[in-house]
Amino acid sequence: MLFITAAWAASVTLNPGDDVASLTSALGPGDEIVFANGIYEIPATIQWSGEGTKNDPITLRANEPGRAVLEFVGESGRIAEIHNSSFITVEGLVFQGGEGWEDIRQGGLRIGNSTNITIQDCEFTQLGGTVMYLSEDNARIALTGNHIHDTHTSSMLYVGCADGTCW
């Protein structure tokens, strides 16, 4: 008997006010998450993980580059983390600290234990914490065309781990 399984890739469009954390928590090969224009208030760190493939990568992108803003409104932390993942592309999103960002250690994006991750044409602004933090074992991370501005008391890019165990 022959069994054929279909690959079900989802294409989902999010709108401001949607529960971004819930709607982007389970990502699979070929999934595409499109963020409509507007400001998405992020109260706690979003966890993105998934195993895309070379032929079916996972994509999280702005409908129009620079017009979908992930604004962190929590007390401290970072906007998003990508962990234990492969073949994920994040494109055209704005990672922005919220009110009082000058006094709060809000960070942008952390990538850990992941491979084949591309962050392109994103904007990182008003962050008082580390803008991009690449920790643990990572391989083939591409950062292209990103714009980092209006940050303070933070590292723009932190690669590695404090005790050296990730090397």
Image: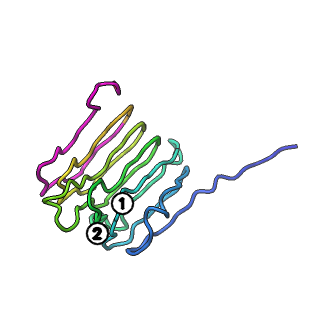
Residue 52 located left or right of residue 108: right
Q: Residue under circle 1? A: 44
Which mark, by number, is residue 157? none
Place residue 66 in its image quadrant.
Answer: bottom left
Residue 26 located left or right of residue 137: right
Using the rendered image of the protein, determine whether residue 103 is visible from the camera's viewpoint: yes
Identify the residue at image location x=24%, y=61%: 96
Residue range of the region highlighted in magenta in the rendering: 141-166
Identify the residue at image location x=26%, y=31%: 162
Q: Is residue 65 above or below residue 121?
A: below
Rendered-image quadrant of the N terminus? top right
Amino acid residing under circle 1: Ala
Name the residue at the right extreme.
1
Q: Nearer the viewer, residue 8 or 98?
A: 98
Which mark, by number, is residue 67? 2
Q: Whole-percent x and y of residue 122?
A: 27, 56
149 is within the stretch colored magenta: yes
Q: Whole-percent x and y of residue 158?
A: 23, 39
Amino acid residing under circle 2: Arg
Secondary structure mostly seen in magenta is: loop
Q: Which marked residue is nearer to the observer: mark 1 or mark 2?
A: 1
Q: Counting other residues with Cα less than 10 Å from the Cα at mark 2, is it few (<14), some (14-19), or many (20 or more)?
A: some
Identify the residue at image location x=17%, y=44%: 155
Q: Whole-percent x and y of residue 134?
A: 31, 39
